[in-house]
Image: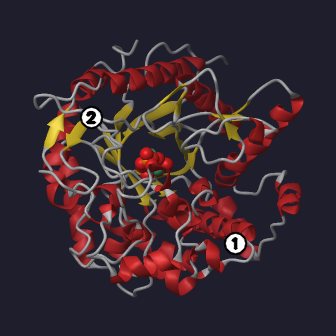
Amino acid sequence: MIRELKKEMPEGFLWGGATAANQIEGGFSEGGKGISVADCYSFDKNLPRENWSDQWHEMTSKQIERALNEGDKHYFPKRTGINFYQNYKEDIRLFAEMGFKCYRMSIAWTRIFPNGDEAEPNQAGLDFYTNVFEELKKYGIEPIVTISHYEMPLALSINYGGWTNRKLIGFFEKYSEVLFKNFGKYVKYWMAFNEINSILKHPFTSAGILEENNQNLKTEVYQAAHHQFVASAAVTKKLREMYPNSKMGCMISYQLPIAYSCNPSDVQAAVDLQRETLFFSDVQVRGEYPAYTARWFDDIGVSLETEDEDWAVLKEGTVDYVSFSYYMTTAVSSEPDKFEKVAGNLLVKGVKNPYLAISDWGWQIDPQGIRVAANQLYDRYQLPILVAENGVGALDKVENGEIHDDYRIEYLNAHLKQLKEAVIDGVDVFGYTAWGCIDIVSASTSQMSKRYGFIYVDLDDEGKGTNRRIKKDSFNWYKDVIKTNGKIID
Ligand code: BG6
């Protein structure tokens, strides 16, 4: 049978936006919240710009100590976010005004289990999210929930060595079960880990691993990833038992690797880099390690400790859908040192692609890449696809109380146009959540001025400002996109 040709976005398409608890909530010392890894990132405007994301790439025990003991001497932007903790009603009302069908959000693990290993959950944290879900329900907005998005309890890192420790599987299972029990009636779509492959890039943020403590970092990182795979599969199985109609997805950061040239060595380098990323979704979709694992682990000197039962758990807990974040493609050369590097692209082999424009933060802009990525993932897995993040971090200017962000509209329109092409290609895409639908603290640089939102938040990089929300021009544009189910995209 040949499937019917689609010319428009599917009916009931989930249009919406995405944020993460650690970048939006604030309320650091409220409601019994514990300290998370995200709360350790400070921002210092006196440092040279190129060093603003250093902590993000490699956190040190010295910086953690500073975060624990000198909280009042430095500024930690993720502790205040945009104060969604207090402001959630107004923010959700604005999402509803745009016509959001869904809202991708995450739960702060430290609001539910402040240190990660307590016997009982923290009721104040559960109450906060119940209120958020009730508010979303009032407007008919479907929540899509990430269980862990870059904010695991710091205590799990300090006391257990983060996800390198197998005990984390049990803590995560317990945490997830509490979420399912309390919020299962509100939430149909879940994802266990945000950008699960990002553990390769920033192991502290993703898995509580301090590089300085590990002799064989590669093995530690893949060991931690193995524990996350098992944990994710175990909770997927649990979710199915508790809520058979709910869905669990995997979520990868997909900076689509493409060969820099037709030199066969560049082609091979691109395939290798693609496997480095898709290894994560391969395991979560297929419930087993891919055929290329043995040779690859041998090449990079990784050996894992696994338990016999892990393999059955992985098989039983495969995901229902595939989601990914898409910001850029990665041009891959077998001789990367001969080329200029790209900012934001942290993969060693990524080089500057001469065909592409760059954002204010040096990220290369490649709208066609989203079509290729969606097609590739669907061809590989034949599972429904969710674009969980996409957007451009830009410097916005307030002029007479207005923000004319035509560059953002242009970026999003170009990407959505290509996503529509993917739908016409036959890809089963069921949702799109624009990243940082309201301005939030940047994950990598901890800046406020790297703005993605349709809604401006009057706060600067040092947290100064009125906290007032202002609709940007893109607010009304996205509202029209949603109202017409994407017909105005051109
Ligand atoms: C993704 C993360 O990698 O990129 C988000 O899931 C993050 O948390 C987003 O905010 C954009 O990155 P940044 O550094 O510009 O905030």
Whether residue 16 sits left or right of residue 127 in the image: it is right
The residue lying toward the viewer, choosing from 14 and 188, is 14
Q: Is residue 240 above or below residue 10?
A: below
- Label 1 vs label 2: CA separation? 39 Å
Q: Residues within 10 Å of mark 1 (few under 14, many from 20)?
A: many
Tell me the residue that label 1 is attached to.
220
Q: Is residue 164 visible to the viewer in this orientation of the structure?
A: no
Q: Quadrant of residue 13?
A: top left
Number of residue marks: 2
The residue lying toward the viewer, choosing from 237 and 68, is 68
Seen at 55% across and 29% down, the residue is: 370
Tell me the residue that label 2 is attached to.
454
Q: Is residue 227 above or below residue 330?
A: below
Residue type at numbered disc 1: Glu
Q: Position of residue 300 (x, y in %)?
A: 83, 60
Seen at 69% across and 60% down, the residue is: 315
Q: Is mark 1 within 8 Å of ligand 1?
A: no
Q: Quadrant of residue 64?
A: bottom left
Classify the position of the C terminus by image quarter.
top left
Whether residue 161 sits left or right of residue 11 in the image: it is right
Q: Is mark 2 within 8 Å of ligand 1?
A: no
Classify the position of the N terminus by image quarter.
top right
Element at label 2: loop
Q: Position of residue 59 (x, y in %)?
A: 52, 69
Q: Position of residue 242 (x, y in %)?
A: 44, 64
Residue type at numbered disc 2: Phe
Whether residue 428 sits left or right of residue 115 in the image: it is right
Mark found first going from the N terminus, 1 or 2: 1
Q: Position of residue 215 (x, y in %)?
A: 73, 77
Element at label 1: helix
Seen at 23% across and 75% down, the residue is: 29
The residue lying toward the viewer, choosing from 231 and 187, is 231
